[in-house]
Amino acid sequence: MSDTLSAIVSSGRTGPSKPALFIGLAGDAPHTPPARIALGEVDRVDLGRAETRSIKHTKLDGANVVIVALADPRMSTNHARLTRVGTMWVLEDLDSKNGTTVGPDRIKKKPLQDGDTILVGHTALLFRAAADQTDLDGDPPEIAPMLDTLHAALADKYRELAAAAKSNVAIEIGGETGTGKDRVARAVHELSNRKGQYVAVNCAGLNASTLESELFGHKKGAFTGATEDRPGNIRSADGGTLFLDEIAELPMAAQAALLRVLQNGEVTPVGSDKPVKVDFRLVTATHRDLDAEVAAGKFRADFRARLLGFAIELPALRRRREDLSMIVSELLDVHASERQVTFSSDAVATLYAHDWPLNVRELERSLQSALAVAPDRIESQHFPASVGATEPMDQPIYREATPEEKGLKEQLSSALARHDGNIAGVGREMGKDPTQIRRWMKRFGIKRE
């Protein structure tokens, strides 16, 4: 079962699912909004180039056809076609000038599988064999600021979260490290309309010796170094939102103290015997299973019960590549707002090929690294070495090759010599995407020159 279908099933959906095509990152215009096309009632999709992007549904010779025009100068006017063949979808390149690739392979004709990434020109497309049909056609649904997604199951959870955010119920955010839990917590604060501050606390980073002082505040003279009164994180969030990230890392003693705060609605600063009333919205996050932590005796059951409310699990970035272009655009707004950044076709392919084991955090760091060394056009080599690597980075780049690998190395070296090191030309000759050519060069220790 595919990642997308698994996510839909686990979300409790029982309705029919249908295939879909997602328009993703456009290398020449990375701020172009993504779009999705429901293929359930479609017989054919024609892909081509135009001055402006358009998606047109029409009937041709009795067939339901979608004509997708992309403002991509590297595409041909009639570039490629997707055709339904029984229950399958087949992609065919229409003798385009720059070719069509699926994953690392340049193709002429190929049946598509769930999750296949298609590259036409500088634009990435994503095929899903089973995307949920709800609100499928068109742009991302308008749910709330910072809660944009084309991932159907996540969109439903975001809608529920937006409703829950307006109440006082506790919010629990799960998901792998780096999936953007802080961003969702900020969205909850914005949607709550609370007038107080948003205060984020990384529980894993709290100093054990000063933990209570940091959370509950202290009075001047309460301990050595306490030269003035401090309100602490909890009182700073009074009237607002307290976000406790990595809540599973909170020591048992601090869990008990925080439980009393939640039960009594008041906090007692270190060095004081006078409790102070507090009113804050609690949002917690962890990549661990808190119920398993309770069973293992590593987390208090009574504190766990107090945290229960609305729960949302954020999918890993590799399971929501439909959103990759939106996330890249948002990160460029943060880290390169004054620059006109573009991506080569190799760079676009690399972004979609990588599994992003550290999720959005890894994507952000990789973009920052590329922006630091690249001119305004990002190439695949500007990303860190770990991005797009086909083998673990602690292995040597070159090892003793098999006879097949030796033959491939000789073929690659000869092709590079014929094309004077032009990787795009080598890719066309070998029927492979330039990203794959670069991977092979790295694997065999081959230099362009």
Image: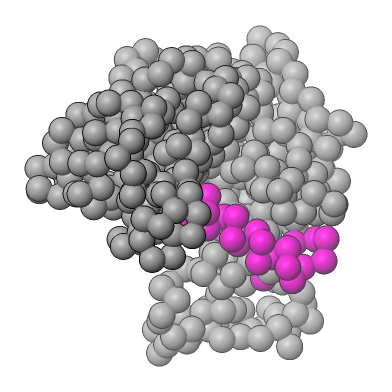
Name the chief secondary structure element in magenta: helix
Please give left or right for residue 318 compared with residue 292 in the image.
right
Residue 351 part of the magenta segment:
no
For this orientation, the residue located farthest to the right is 51
Is 55 drawn above or below residue 260 in the view shown? Answer: above
What x and y, as percent, mark residue 444?
53, 83
- Which sits in the foreground, 198 or 347? 198
Residue 375 part of the magenta segment:
yes
- Determine the residue positioned at 47% across, 43% down: 231
Please give left or right for residue 168 compared with residue 108 in the image.
left
What x and y, as percent, mark residue 56?
75, 18
Q: Would residue 210 be visible to someone looking at this image?
A: yes
- Determine the residue positioned at 86% across, 46% down: 73
Q: How is the image coloured?
A: one colour
Please state, as top left, top right, bottom left or bottom right, where the N terminus lies in the image.
Answer: top left
What x and y, as percent, mark residue 158?
48, 24
- Which region is colored magenta? 354-381
- Which sits in the foreground, 327 or 33? 327
What x and y, as percent, mark residue 425?
75, 68
